[in-house]
Every structure is written in structure tokens, then in C-alpha cells.
Amino acid sequence: MNCMQQTEKKGFSGVQVFGIVVGVMVLTVLITLFAAHAWLFPKPFTPVVLNPQEEQQLERKLERFENLTAAKPAPAGRKMQVDSGPVQAGELTATGGLKPEAYSEKGASREINLTEREINSLLAKNTDLARKVAIDLADDLVSLKILVPVDPDFPMLGGKTLRVRAGAELAYRNRRPIVKLRGVSVMGVPVPNAWLGGLKNIDLVKEFGTDSGFWKTFADGVETINVRDGKLYIKLKE
């Protein structure tokens, strides 16, 4: 007598299926709540902190820009200080004030050469901008991340924080600067070109630089622009 071997098919019971469905629903709700919280309440950006060597390099660069140093009045008999370092002794009068000096451009640098980390660290100096704004430098591209607090009285989004991203091409070709808005997004949703006034991917210097105004003045004063991964170089004309 031949015995038939029957293979038992094992499956989930009704209780197990119900438990799996409930577990998936709970997990989905938790993920949705986490995503919504991160979307509506984004964490502040972490400010960039330079190491001692980077800080010294930045200070040397800033020393060349005298217009970036704000003088601080000092009590009589004390050495006057500025934001980026002490004033040289020869620049002070006997009473501690600045000596008059004839204007000269001899030896002045017209080059601006900064790294991405240096730019972001400047935002963190004496301001909370570094927690709300972050700048990224890539090849011919400058990108911004901005956290924008919404007024509490604003409908629906009142009291929330919007995450805004924007990108612009910044380059120098054919002996003229190029500035193109690549796009703007709010909470990850790209803003339509029509809402941006049709300016997306339009060379603003070429479009508006023929008439007298900001873009023509800007273009006429720039000799070269070079944006590379993590670095920005601009040279101004005389």
C-alpha cells in the first residue's frame, strides 16, 4: 500500500495577519509624524567653526580689507582697537585718535579669495545668521539654505519655520560675468518659474546689463569670477 505524503502548507493565522497590519499602520503613523515634525520644525544649522590655522588664514585675508574693520573708541591713554585687530601705533595721535591720512590705492588688493568654510564662519561672528543661513560653493554654482520663521498670526503655517533653498550660477565667460537663477524651493517644493517672474535660467547680466542700472554697473566692475568646489575667487577692475 503506497502512502501519500501530504505537504502541509503553513500560513499566517488571522490573528497574525491582523497584528502585522496594525504594526505596519503604527510604524507608518510614527514615520509620518517624524517627517511632519522635521518638515515643519527643522533644526537650526550647525555654525561652522574654523580651526586655529583656518582662523589665522581668514584673519590675514580680512586685514587687507580696511573697510571691514570698525574702529572702537578707546579711553584716553589706551590703545585703540578695531574688530579685526589693533591699530598700528603710527596711526594714532597723542590723544588716541586716528591720524589724518591721504588716500592712496598703492598696494591695495582687488582680489576676494574665500573658502566656503570661511564664508559660513563669518556668518557666525556676532550673529545667529549661521543657524539660519548656510552657503554651499560648487563648480559655477552658489547655493543657499535658509530657515525662515513664519509670523505666528500667519494662517496654517503660523509659528512654523520654512526651509528655503536657492541656487544661482555664478561664472565668468566671454569677458563678462554670468549670473543665472537656477531655482528656488520651499519645503522641498520647487517654486514655478512664473512665480519667480520668469527669471529662472536667465542670464541676468545679459538680459539687464545693457541698460544703465545695477547689473551693468556690477558687470563693468568685475574682471573675473571663479567658483569652484568650496572656493570663491573674485577680482575687481580698477
Image (cartoon, rainbow, N blue to C red):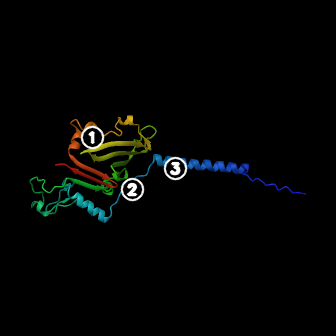
**Badge 1 is on which residue?**
205
Residue at 73% from the left image edge and 48% from the top image edge: 14
Residue drawn at (82%, 56%), measured in percent from left and top?
Answer: 5
**Of callouts 2 and 3, which one flags the residue occurring earlier in the amino acid sequence?**
3
- At a point 30% along the width and 43% down the height, the residue shown is 179
Q: Please say whether residue 141 is visible from this viewpoint.
A: yes
Q: Where does the image place residue 10, in percent across and percent down from the top left?
A: 75, 53
Q: Quadrant of residue 118?
A: bottom left
Q: Earlier in the sequence, mark 2 or mark 1?
A: 2
Mark 3 element type: helix
- Total residue callouts: 3
- Residue 211, image quadrant: top left
Q: Residue at x 56, y 49 (%)?
A: 30
In the rendering, at what x and y percent does residue 95 appear?
10, 60
Q: Amino acid at mark 1?
A: Val
Front disc: 3 or 1: 1
Q: Which mark is residue 34?
A: 3
Give the quadrant of the N terminus.
Answer: bottom right
Q: Nearer the viewer, residue 77 or 208?
A: 208
The local crowd at label 3, few if under 14, some if 14 to 19, many if 20 or more residues have their Cα within 10 Å, is: few
The CA distance from mark 2 to mark 3 is 20 Å
Numbered disc 1: secondary structure: helix
Dot 2, crowdedness within 10 Å: few (<14), some or many (≥20)?
few
Q: State the SS at label 2.
A: loop
Evaluate if marks 2 and 3 touch, with contact meaning CB atoms under 8 Å apart. Answer: no
Residue under circle 2? 46
Residue 195 place in picture, x, y as percent: 38, 35
**Which is nearer the eye, 82 or 229?**
229
Q: Nearer the viewer, residue 32 or 127?
A: 32
- Tell me how far mark 3 sits from mark 1, CA to CA: 43 Å
